[in-house]
Amino acid sequence: HGGGFETGSGAGFLYQGAHLAAHDVVVVTINYRLGVLGFAAGEALRDDESGAAGNWGLLDQVAALRWVRDNIASFGGDPDNVTLFGESAGSMSVTALCGMPAAAGLFRRAVGQSGAPTAGTFETSERSGHALLTELGLAGDPRGLAALRDVPIDRLLAAQAQVSATHRITQGLPFSPTVDHGVLPRPPIAAIRAGAARHVEVIVGTNRDEVTLFAIGDRAAFTLDDARLRRRMGRVLGEHADEAIEVYAKARTVRGEAATPTALWFAILTDLVFRVPVLRFAEAQAAHQANTFSYLFAWTSPVLGGILGSPHALEIPFVFGTLDQPPFNSFTGADQDPAAGELSTAMMQRWTSFARTGQPDATWPGYENNRRATMIFDRDRRVDDAPMDEERRFWDIFGERVS
């Protein structure tokens, strides 16, 4: 499940597995520790037995995978044919596990929806922990982060909420996976580039307009003019802001897409935070595994007159076949358009075919860095080669910053 590594549950209504299970698969949803309990990191927390100094939530996911390996045959499943899949923070987890030594061999396939293997540095994560200590009035405690173990859970969670609201350290996720030199000896993307997941078949992709979901509370984002766009973009990209605006405006105009300041803001942020990191994961994995598949989800939600486009998380009810259930039916448009149901069926068929065989669809070619074949999930299903490639190439100027 997703939720920014701070919220969510495998038991949530988003993840009801009955419709997927009807496609000859066994669906298992899991829970893992969240927030400070799952992702606080620091040398004072180092566990001698496992070597972990963070990533407790990832270790929970590994424990769940081991449970599946040991028990799934009793439920009609195949322990040698496990597909791990997740969305948002769940996808960040899935792709991180592809580069995590303790998870090696526990799954055969992986599906990552809107999340790449991002892991913060140990130093960055420790700053989050020290911010938490300060909030709790424990900044001077000689035990350092180990002092958190004695804090009552209600106080700990209240302090966590305050830190999360005021500290945007790792792309807005102060408690998230960390290169702790134990559970994650190096950045997962580096391990994947070196072939750590060469035996794992992969589907990975994003939604066309990811960040619009997070802009619901940012009404000014929907009324930007050119000057305000450039000020905002300057805070994000510095000296590259004007170049990004020019590249995106030109590419979108050529394709006949909106190039208003608002449209440019959403498109650039979507690529920075979601699409480009996911594509770099696909590139890294495709170098070792031919069965690496890329998708772009482009169905438009009718909510708020369609201004959100295809936002973050919209694909989840399509994948789980729950889009006609309240409250999804309004968010997805299933209560107005029968094509939504057809798209959902198509996605469920491809996800479960991939889980069973490693091949989602005979018409969906593997991702190669010279072609970049991408399945577009919209009113129709089609393969486009290198969609929005002008924008993707722009990010090469940032090198490892977007990885």
Image: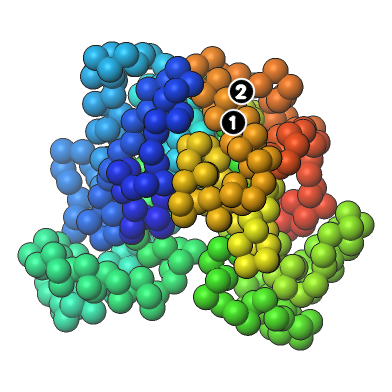
Q: Secondary structure at mark 2?
A: loop
Q: Which residue is tagged 2? A: 360
Horizontal relation, residue 47 to residue 127: left or right: left
> Which quarter of the picture shows residue 292?
top right
Give coordinates of residue 123: x percent, y percent.
Answer: 37, 62
Q: Label 2: few (<14), some or many (≥20) within 10 Å?
A: many
Q: Amino acid at mark 2?
A: Pro
Q: Earlier in the sequence, mark 2 or mark 1?
A: 1
Q: Which residue does the image show at 64% across and 77% down from the upper left?
A: 221
SS for callout 1: helix
Q: Nearer the viewer, residue 3 or 291?
A: 3
Does the residue at mark 2 contact the one at mark 1 (Cβ under 8 Å)? Answer: no
Q: Is residue 402 visible?
A: no
Which label is found at residue 14? Answer: none
Instruction: Establish if 30 lies above or below 139.
Output: above
Check disc 1 and give the amino acid type.
Answer: Thr
Q: Which of the image's four quarters has the N terminus?
A: top left
Occupied quadrant, residue 307: bottom right
Image position of 274 (left or right of 385): left
Residue 242, visible in the rendered structure:
yes
Label 1: how many residues lie within 10 Å, few (<14), some (14-19) or many (20+)? some
- x, y percentage for residue 385? 80, 36
- Circle 1 residue: 345
Is 47 situated left or right of 339 in this image? left
Which residue sits at x=64%, y=50%? 336
**Horizontal and vertical percent for residue 100?**
39, 36
